[in-house]
Image (cartoon, grey):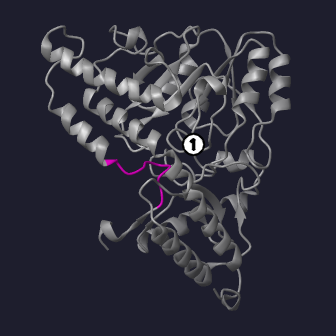
Amino acid sequence: MGMNSAAYLDHNATTTLRPEAAAAVRGGLGLTGNPSSVHRFGRLVRRAIEDARDAVAALVGARPAEVVLTSGGTEANNLAIRGVCERRVLASAVEHPSVLGAADAIAQVPVDGDGVVDLAALTDLLAADTAPALVSVMLANNETGVVQPLASVAEIAHSHGAVLHCDAVQAAGKIAFDYRNLGVDLLTLSAHKLGGPAGVGALVIAGDVAVTAVNCGGGQERGFRAGTENAAGIAGFGAAAAVATSGLPAFAELARWRDRIEQRIAEAASVQVFGAGTERLPNTSCLAMPGVDSETQVMAFDLAGIAVSAGSACSAGKVEPSHVLDAMGVDAAEADCAIRVSLGWDSTEADAERFIDAWIKLYQRLGDAPTTAMAV
């Protein structure tokens, strides 16, 4: 089966490169010069980088001077967590591994059954120790799509003198937000989640937050991040950010197809949709097929020409138990049957219908209910 006939429904892992971003990358590759050089060649590369920085800043309501360009979301998260020195770190239990693994002894803030951070628990943890703290809470979860109440988190964090970091990698380009209105001090972004190339990201740093570089050796990015900038990738990031900004209303419409997937599948089986009781990204559904483990589902859907994933795709191809579902209190046996379906900017209604048909057929063949109950 050719790739063109496949249904790609793993956009939270990485989404399709936007044509505008591809064109910008090609243009960047055609430039010669180091952006730190003062001659004409260097200035042309610098201009391409700064134009991209402007577009990335506009996507989240930041000032260009607040945007530090990095090699991706993981580096940006590490810079945020490790670069804010001499603070204890609190992070929600459903954070991405690049946050939870960025420092030793991170105190995990529990979440409720929908995966929403427990604000009372956060308050208690901050009040229990007067030492300066950094709080890290993502805007939207990569596995469930659940959107966190960042404005409330910010109010609590700042009332205790804490710095607030937000991993907005999954939310940027999918829902509209202004990082100032969220009240966060540090904000992580990644290009390949919104239609840009992989290997490029950013950390937005509010002007009054002290951050120390994690990798040193050069004065690039105002001293926050050493190393010659990836000009072509950054140009692609900027182009993707600009298109994603204008495409937010269209992206919101993906909720109709997500809801149709969940409705049709619920008619065929007793399905648990994780996080369905609260606000989610319009493109994301995390659901369990009763009686069929997630690894089997991923392989079966792949053979049917449909790409989905089992939780996060950041574990070198491994299918491992989801720490997100575990933190939500999901039974281990049910969590083992969970997959993530994530639509993207170029998804079609036919993709959704194809998944629905394939899901029902797979459940009829391998699920834990009689096939006579599977009429559609």
Q: Residue furthest bottom?
A: 372
Based on the picture, tell me whether residue 16 belongs to the magenta stretch.
Answer: yes
**Secondary structure category for the residue under label 1:** loop
- Residue that mark 1 sits on: 175
Q: Residue at x 30, y 43 (%)?
A: 20
Looking at the picture, how far across and down is residue 279, in whole percent?
Answer: 70, 48
Q: Is residue 10 above or below residue 123?
A: below
The range drawn in magenta is 9-18
Q: Is residue 97 above or below residue 316?
A: above
Looking at the picture, how far across and down is residue 63, in whole percent?
Answer: 48, 18
Looking at the picture, how far across and down is residue 54, in whole percent?
Answer: 39, 24
Q: Residue at x 58, y 13 (%)?
A: 84
44 sits to left or right of 165: left
**Magenta stretch, overall SS:** loop
For label 1, count other residues whose C-alpha is less than 10 Å away and answer few (under 14), some (14-19) or many (20+). Answer: some
Based on the picture, tell me whether residue 24 belongs to the magenta stretch.
Answer: no
Q: Is residue 63 above or below residue 261?
A: above
80 sits to left or right of 287: left
Q: Residue at x 34, y 47 (%)?
A: 18
Out of 109 and 174, give the one closest to the viewer.
174
